Image (cartoon, rainbow, N blue to C red):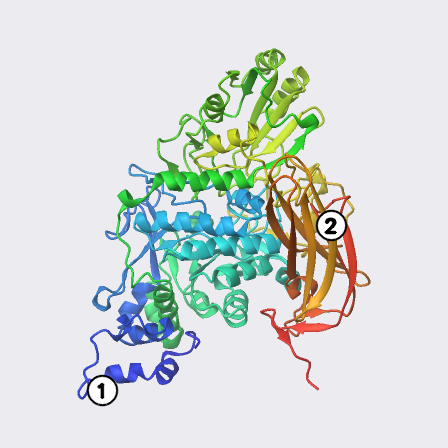
Amino acid sequence: MKISSPLSQICAAVLLCASATTTYADAPAPAQPWMNAKLPAAQRAALVVQAMTLDEKLRLVYGYLGADSDWKKSKRPAGARPQSAGYIDGVDRLGIPPLYETDAGLGVASQPGPDVRQGTALPSGLSTAASWDTAGARAAGAMIGDEARKFGFNVLLAGGVNLLREPRNGRNFEYAGEDPLLAGRIVGAQIAGIQSQKVVATLKHFALNDQETNRTTLNVKIDDSAARMSDLLALQLAYEDGQPGSVMCGYNRVNGAYACENSYLLNTVLKQEWGFKGWVMSDWGATHSTIPAANAGLDQQSGMPFDLSDYFGPPLKEAVLNGWVPQQRLDDMALRIVGAMFEHGVIDHPVTVAPQQIDFRAHGAASQHAAQEGMVLLKNRDKLLPLADGARRIAVIGGYADKGVMAGGGSSLVYPQGGNAVPELEPKVWPGPVMIYPSSPYQALQRKLGKATLRFDDGRDPARAAALARDSDVVLMFATQWTGEGMDVPDLALPKQQDALIHAVTAANPRTVVVLETGGPVTMPWLEQAGAVLEAWYPGTQGGEAIASVLTGEVNPSGRLPMTFPVSEAQLPRPKLDGYPEQADARIEVDYHEGAAVGYKWFDLKQQTPLFPFGFGLSYTEFAMLGLRAEVRDGRLQASFEVRNTGKLAGKQVAQIYVAPVQARWEAPKRLGGFSKVSLAAGARTSVSLSVDPRLLATFDSASKRWQVAAGDYRVTLAAHARDAQASSVVIHLDAASYDVQGRAIKASH
Ligand code: BGC
């Protein structure tokens, strides 16, 4: 049953609503029949909304910031958890608890202030995507869901899957890269993991919120079918796999209308076509109206006093009483909110604040494991890594590696136990503080490499650092790029003259391993000179241990890039970032003329050679992939093949299947159609079989709202990355086929 139907229709279908109000006399019904956990969530929601007054319904759709705010001179509501992102009153009389909301995808974040919560941070979202491990993403989601619940939250604002269309986007680290299949599957798994802990997750930011510059006024222009095959596909797959209870609409405008009052996106695509039954909350400060927003499908205003006005407060009441917003629309909002609360167990299992029950040791181990799975070895000349026993004099340079590892800035920032290891870094205010988690790679290496002598240089003086490098067997050169919410980086160069430092150090000693802690892709003008490069992303609160375990070979790296690393910005669809540097309140427009040709698809289309391709990553062992076969089984394209570990160490390979039509043209020469990460002992082999979602073989036809597969030959390629010279392929014929908007086969009518 759709909870989007008017309340009266739902009650007619459910019967119990009627009996709750009319048959008390002969058979006393329980006082709160919606508390019967055996009933379906939609039915329980219908029962309780039926019992609500107008003011109680209105209370559910109006959210507050859960922290005091200096800039707005506001105090958090009494019920809110201190220093939290959001709070919505419940209806105590009817047994509906408040919504306690916290950010976000890497763990339980805190608004800055005196009582920050100290928790466990996962590695960045890009690191999780780089793991290509959906089971791992689910487990990581369950870990942060558990932590959220025990800190007293029933909504985690986690589930960010904005596509990496703009490598300079300051929030890329929160998301899952440039490919809709990989990003959608990873974030869907994370959402499912969070919700397994009876905490509602939040798919965000809906939609096309792909840059931070002028994010609150930016208008994104994109063709509908291109959006469906790129950004919207990532959101759709994450939605299908994760079944999130809530969706957050973004700050930006899409084809003219603000995302939070965009009826096409919210009513048509999300609710009608995809069948989303939960509620849409606005981003904090992303509501711009009462009547247009409510009628366009926004169900809850968030984070007041962020918005200019209390649109879903008294003005919404007035609009409902005047009939400008139909009463049924308000009922629908309330039904969606309490429906998701019943569905995800937050009413039957109320949260309490019990941080003493958090197993921080186990959570730390989970974070470390996640970080290890996501590290990508990009270069390894002459097997410089893992560090050999013979390396006695090791220089560790730069990147605060003596103290800890970098984290990204903004609302997703998790404050660590032990506090900031380098508190003096600027900026200290939003989107700062620049946080260095107190997990030092230098100290972890020292513990693991008892026989070696480690010396640290902070890298501030390149000549001094080079002298140390010259006098060492091996150099571990740490470089950082801090990125954060509300700002983009001007270009892809490492900041603060680190390129010059790396030039000096690699020139002094070519046996230099560059360890990158970056928010996204960076350029590497020193790549030729470097001996090895490890992309460690923002590796979370156990990042130092995780990095040391990979450098020493305790862990064999198995991450693969979830995005392309360009040689330079000139290769991008927009060599210059639109709107940068930001002029406050400028109403800029970005034309996504590349359509669905995002990332490697753009590079393929333009025949450009990237610095490192999508899907790329080395291992300390070698693999062979062979025996590719493709067939159509039960109407689906299946690829099967074998993966062998041909080297001398246990390791993990990420097998990637790319698909492309032979005769027809898509937005780009090929798309990722499937992937599988396999773990193999030295010498071991395994058979893999993958099925390709038909939407990845189709183009979306906006007029008929169908995914159309054209009849013809299709090339199916088995590869280790998007530019793999060892790839093998087969060609298979596919018949024409149509799929509805959700990807379900439409039988041809005769
Ligand atoms: C961010 C959201 C976040 C919200 C609440 C906004 O600034 O865009 O991702 O969930 O704040 O903190």
Q: Which residue is mark 1?
A: 23
- Residue 531 lies left or right of residue 314; in this view the side is right
SS assignment at label 2: strand
Mark 1: C-beta under 8 Å from nearest atom of ligand 1: no
Name the image quarter holding the N terminus.
bottom left
Marks 2 and 1: which is nearer the front? 2
- Is any atom of residue 526 visible in this view? no
206 with respect to 57 (left or right) = right
Residue at position x 65%, y 25% in the image: 384
Q: Amino acid at mark 1?
A: Thr
On screen, residue 283 versus residue 314, left or right, reads: right
Quick one: which residue is furthest to the front in this view? 683
Q: Which mark is residue 626?
A: 2
Whole-angstrom CA distance, mark 2 to mark 1, is 69 Å
Rendered view: 343 above or below 577 = below
Check disc 2 and give the amino acid type.
Leu
Q: Residue at x 57, y 59 (%)?
A: 254
Using the image, tell me which numbered label, if any, was put on residue 631. Answer: none
Q: Which percent across, then down, holds residue 507?
A: 68, 17
Indicate the position of residue 153 as horizontal and vertical percent values.
Answer: 33, 52
